Image (cartoon, rainbow, N blue to C red):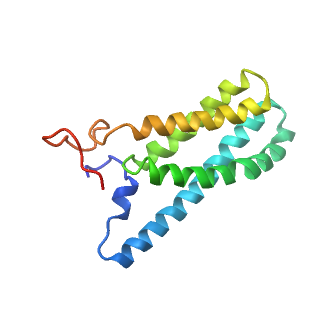
Amino acid sequence: MPPGSGTSIAALIRAEGTGMRIARIAAVTAGLVIVGAIVGTVVSTAIAMYWAPLRLWYLPHAFRFGVGIGAPVGAVLGPVAAWLLMRHVPLGHAIGGTALGTLAGAALGLLLLLPQFVYMGAVLGFVVAVARLSGRTPWQDGRIDPPPGGTLPRE
């Protein structure tokens, strides 16, 4: 993999021996759960702070909301999407892209000014971001040269 191209999940789990491979899969999954929970908390807190702009006293309540709603959702959806649909996407793109997609979907939901649309918009934004990221091939992202046949073999 060229330097500076980012590391995908598929690249992280390649290892010698079955035991080492299982250990790496467990470590990568644990890392994805932690990062998903953190990103879910930050995104949910940002969404909750929209309802009380310029009221810093509301920040602890918004953070509790983020931890209560965003952390569990991010801890589940992040690793599931990464393993099932975004194995060859660089981790930085996967994390940042899904976070921005979630925020964009929530912002569209906020336009309707109903809390249930904010949640539905956030999930829809996440799904759209995952679909967009998973549809890209590694050579479209400039990480590798395309093979002569034009397609990559699936792992």
In the figure, 12 relative to 60: above or below? below
In the figure, 98 relative to 112: above or below? below
Whole-percent x, y for residue 134 in the image: 41, 41
Whole-percent x, y for residue 67 in the image: 74, 52
Which residue is at 81% across, 31% downward?
Answer: 51
Say left or right for 81 vs 59: left
Residue in front for this viewpoint, 149 or 145: 149
In the figure, 47 relative to 2: above or below? above
Whole-percent x, y for residue 38 in the image: 63, 52
**Residue farthest top in this picture:** 111
Which residue is at 66% across, 24% downward?
Answer: 108
**Residue farthest left in this picture:** 148
Which residue is at 39% across, 46% downward?
Answer: 89
Say left or right for 144 vs 70: left
Say left or right for 58 vs 144: right
Q: Give the quarter of the figure containing the C terminus.
A: bottom left
Which residue is at 61% across, 54% downward?
Answer: 76
Say left or right for 13 vs 65: left
Residue in front for this viewpoint, 62 or 119: 119
Q: Quadrant of residue 43?
A: top right
